[in-house]
Amino acid sequence: MTVHFVGAGPGAADLLTLRAVNLLRAADVVVYAGTYLDAEVLSHCRSEARLVDTQDLDLDQITDELVGGHEAGLEVVRLCSGDPSLYSAVHEQARRLDAAGVTWDVTPGVPAYAAAAAVVGAELTVPELVQSVVLTRTQARSTAMPEGESLAAFAAINATLCLHLAITRTRVLAAELAEHYGADCPVVVVASASRPDQLVLRGTLADIADAVEDAGLRQAAVILVGRALAPDVRAGESYLYAPTRDRTAKRRP
């Protein structure tokens, strides 16, 4: 049997991949991150499946659930919020499964930053304005950031910045980012993207902290920063679709 790490997407039950839905329908045990999921996501599970919420479990307890299900010959799904490639602790869990001789695989999901951008209809890479996206977080009561991965270092390149796990430090980070992006730089905060309680806040680095504090946001929010987020952004257009591009050139085999 294989333990399946499955990306649940940003929370909405209809934003899972077909593969994710099929794995949930076949699962005997589903170990899920309840903090960030709409309960409707679990409607894809069979009624007889055992559902384990990890909100109050540590990493070893979670691993025990995965290994125990595997050893019992059961189909086990570890349901991660967003996409497992970002802030999902898959690395730590997979290392423990390897040590226990348990096979595993990963099914990707819609990442939270992509859902947030979709909510406001924003392309994060606008031609001739910004062509890079930085996915990062800040440190508060969390794992230390590696040396060299400072917010200032990322901000200095003026890429579109997608901040996860940072909503409680909005005021501090906005002041720091304003030194590089300018206080008038557009900011979008999307809380619980795609879920029924979704909330969107628009502002600038000068005033977004006030909006976040007024809304009482404490978790499940993504902060997007950059000039591409302006509602009326105007910049260049993609060369790929330009009428002046030569489309008669022979394609490579």
Image: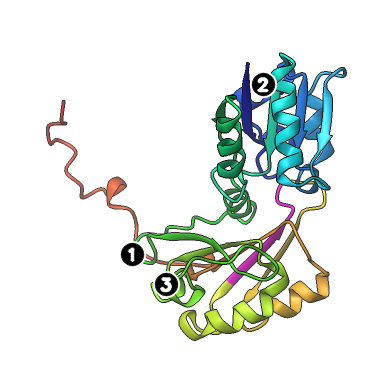
Identify the residue under disc 2: 23
Image quadrant containing the N terminus: top right
* Principal secondary structure, stretch drawn in magenta: strand
Q: Amino acid at mark 3?
A: Asn
In this image, 209 relative to 232: left or right? right
In this image, 94 relative to 53: left or right? left
Label 1's element?
loop
Residue 47, relative to residue 176: is it above or below? above
Which residue sits at x=83%, y=70%? 216
Categorize mark 1 by other alpha carbons within 10 Å: few (<14), some (14-19), many (20+). Answer: few
In this image, 148 relative to 59: left or right? left
Separation of marks 2 and 1 at Cα, in angstroms: 42 Å
Residue at the top extreme of this rendering:
73
* Magenta residues, start to end: 187-194
Image quadrant containing the C terminus: top left
Question: Which marked residue is nearer to the observer: mark 2 or mark 1?
Answer: 2
Which quadrant would residue 219 be assigned to in this image?
bottom right
Residue 213 in the image, given as x and y percentages of width and height: 79, 75
Categorize mark 2 by other alpha carbons within 10 Å: few (<14), some (14-19), many (20+). Answer: many
Separation of marks 3 and 1 at Cα, in angstroms: 12 Å
- Asked whether the viewer can see residue 205, the reply is no
Q: Amino acid at mark 2?
A: Leu
Residue 175 in the image, given as x and y percentages of width and height: 59, 84
Residue 86 in the image, given as x and y percentages of width and height: 56, 49
Residue at the left extreme of this rendering:
250
Q: Amino acid at mark 1?
A: Glu
Label 3's element?
loop
Residue 194, relative to residue 217: is it above or below? above
- Asked whether the viewer can see residue 159, the reply is yes
Query: What is the number of the mark on residue 128?
Result: 1
Residue 36 in the image, given as x and y percentages of width and height: 75, 47
Query: What is the number of the mark on residue 158?
Result: 3
